[in-house]
Image (cartoon, coloured by chain):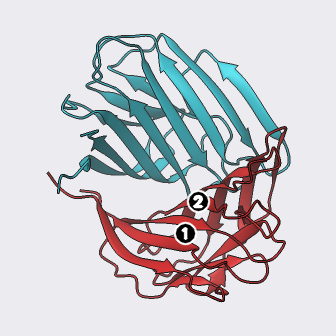
Chain colours: A red, B cyan
Amino acid sequence: MANTFFKINTVTVGAGGAATIAFNVIPQIYSDLKIIYSGRNVNNAYTFSIALNGTTVTQSRRFYATGSSGASDTYNGMYTDYSGAVANSFGNAEINIFNYSASTAKSLAVDAVSEDNYSSAYMNLGALLSTTTIPISSVSLIPESGNFAQYSSATLYGVKRL
Amino acid sequence: MAYTYEPIATQTVSGVSSVSFTSIPSTYTDLKVVFSGYNDAPLMYINYNGSTSGYSTTFVGGNGSVAASARYGSPWLYVWAPGAGTYFNLSVDVMSYANTARWKSWICKGYITDNSGGPTLWVGTWASTAAINRVDIFTSSLTMSGNFTIYGIKAA
């Protein structure tokens, strides 16, 4: 049986936090990329954005919901936990970047949730599009403001098709 | 270490209205179909084993300004048209596809960022206990281009 997922790297934020979670060495030998994120912002900021090759992806459509309502907008931040969230809770996200090494636009699929043990916790489906035609060699996650908290982490996987 | 997630087949297409995966083995627990590319037509839909009946779908999503939900008696994967040439992606998880004791159900997540499109989450049911050995994905015109990959997922 063929393997499909290959772990490329894991980044875990240390004491003092970090302004980005970055994967700066991405080999061009896979079909797609997948990032599994678990993190929290130290500031009162509910989201993080995604940068490809150093440029933040801004073309976005989100469907998002709380425990009581749903809505849609074009904001490019994906939900995670913030400083006001209950202690020790971390948001989670799965980020898929398709055809990352192709010379075509790159579409991203992001499922993100914050966890707060309250009805104000958010989830979102995020559709992002980067029009760059340059293969992706670096991916960064950037808090809406401030730093990612200690113990925030993300793992980058390469995904192979046949 | 056992691998649990295996690519069964990949198709790269340009300007087609359908893609078929046939002779799907029954050796996995679940199936996953992933599409990345573009399709200018306003919908894509799925059929199993060549059947055109017995489908029900419900979706929730947003187009960048309005959130919506609806139920259909058709096997839609999305119904909001992306802009011409807009790259997007879909994933369809088909659970227990070979289990002959239950109807088949799936989850489709689509991520479109342009025109009237947006992210949508669909759930669907096919009222059949037949093991799925064929998956067809259609659109309404010769407009699908990109990569389709079907994966087999083993629970153990």
Residue A27 percent across, percent down from the top left: 34, 82
Q: Do labels 1 and 2 share a chain?
A: yes
Q: Which amino acid lies under the numbered mark 2 shown in the image of this protein?
A: Ala
Residues at discs 1 and 2 in contact (Cβ within 8 Å): no
Q: Please identify the quarter of the rendering in which residue A94 is found.
A: bottom right
Q: Is mark 1 on a helix, strand or loop?
A: loop
- Residue B17 in view: no
Residue B28 percent across, percent down from the top left: 24, 35
The quadrant in which the C terminus of chain B is found is: top left
Return the mark for residue A93: 2
Badge 1: residue crowd in 10 Å (few <14, some 14–19, many ≥20): many
Badge 2: residue crowd in 10 Å (few <14, some 14–19, many ≥20): many
The residue depicted at 79 percent of the width and 80 percent of the height is A145
Residue B37 percent across, percent down from the top left: 49, 55
Horizontal relation, residue B82 to residue A8: left or right = right
Horizontal relation, residue B82 to residue B69: left or right = left
Return the mark for residue A80: none
Q: Which amino acid lies under the numbered mark 1 shown in the image of this protein?
A: Ala
- Residue A43 in view: yes
The quadrant in which the N terminus of chain B is found is: bottom left
Horizontal relation, residue A43 to residue B106: left or right = right
Where B115 sits versus A154, above or below?
A: above
Tell me the subunit letter for badge 2: A
The residue depicted at 47 percent of the width and 63 percent of the height is A98
Residue A105 percent across, percent down from the top left: 55, 69
Residue hosting label 1: A105
The answer to which of B133 and B102 lies nearer the viewer is B102
Q: What element carries label 2?
A: strand
Q: Please identify the quarter of the rendering in which residue A26 is found.
A: bottom left
